[in-house]
Image: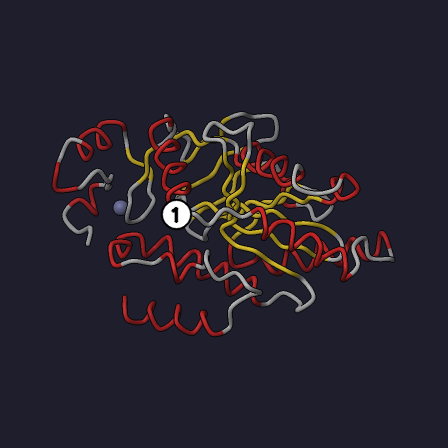
Amino acid sequence: MFLLLNFLFKKKENTKQLKDKDTSTTSRRTKEQIATRKGELGEYKINIQLDQLPKDYCYLSDLFVENPKAKSGYSQIDHLVITPYGIMVIETKNYQGTIYGAKNQKNWLINGKFKMGNPFVQNYGHIQALKSLIDKKYHGLFISIVSFTKRCTFKVDLDYRKISSDELIVYDIELSEFIHRKISAMRTQYKEPLLNEHDILILYNYFAKANITEPKIREQHNKILKSKNTEQATCEACNKPVSEKVKTYCLNNKKFKGKIYCFDHQNNHN
Ligand SMILES: [Zn+2]
């Protein structure tokens, strides 16, 4: 399995997106991260989706920018796609289970039990951070997308599935299809593109320039997030939500090295 993944990532490296060298999935990969391979497989699926987009779209992955309004002072954006009709900001989630969520709700539920923050509220924060980097004339162009894996079932506000919405919830395997449908709808609506090639390149350069690649700053941010995170703890291997009791048990047990595992992965986490 690991060898296969390795092969897939190598292949990916050769067909890499624009200039995004320091922050690629591949370069962040270390042997220690094998335990998170399911999460990475999810990321790989997203990358396949992004590769299917037209060549005149630009995209950036794992963008890390300053955000004075965030707790840690930074925002981490999973994927950003700049198209002739809008800037799509994509937040990916690796949860497993039924997702219950409505607009105007601060918290959503997984399987009716575990709380997760409304991902659109989170992504709104990311979009605000991105807006602060670019000219005001581009501020109306943002589209918020949250992508879940197929291990989820949606019980969410149906508006999130309507192509006319600027807040879309999708499965990872339909991401490019949704982006395509969204653009088609906007093309019918506007006729002329809202961004020309030059605008797209300008925006790409602004975002790429603002991207912080310094590993120490990124690590610090993740530490702060972990320490302040009072939300649902999840298994390091499969991302399944675990109870407070399981979380405490794992964190107090040296063999887990500060990581949290569900029952299934406590004996089988390498
Ligand atoms: Zn697990």
Q: Position of residue 234 (x, y in %)?
A: 32, 38
Depth order, front residue of 181/31:
31
Per the image, the residue denoted by label 1 is 215
The answer to whether 101 is drawn above or below residue 41 in the figure is above
Depth order, front residue of 78/37:
78
The answer to whether 110 is drawn above or below residue 19 in the figure is above
Q: Position of residue 21 (x, y in %)?
A: 48, 62
| Left or right relative to 157: residue 230 | left
Q: Amino acid at mark 1?
A: Pro
Q: Is mark 1 within 8 Å of ligand 1?
A: no
| Left or right relative to 121: residue 94 | left
| Left or right relative to 254: residue 177 | right
Residue visible at 57% across and 48% down in the picture: 90
- Quarter of image, res 229: top left
Residue visible at 41% across and 41% down in the picture: 217
- Quarter of image, res 204: bottom right
Question: The N terminus lies in which quarter of the figure?
Answer: bottom left
- Quarter of image, res 253: top left
Residue visible at 86% across and 53% down in the picture: 190
Residue visible at 45% across and 70% down in the picture: 12
**How many dots with numbers?**
1
SS for dot 1: helix
Q: Position of residue 117 (x, y in %)?
A: 48, 30
Instruction: Characterize the local packing of mark 1: few (<14), some (14-19) or many (20 or more) Cα atoms within 10 angstroms.
Output: few
Q: Position of residue 175 (x, y in %)?
A: 57, 56
Depth order, front residue of 224/252:
224
Question: The C terminus lies in which quarter of the figure?
Answer: bottom left
The way the protein has been coloured in the rendering is secondary structure
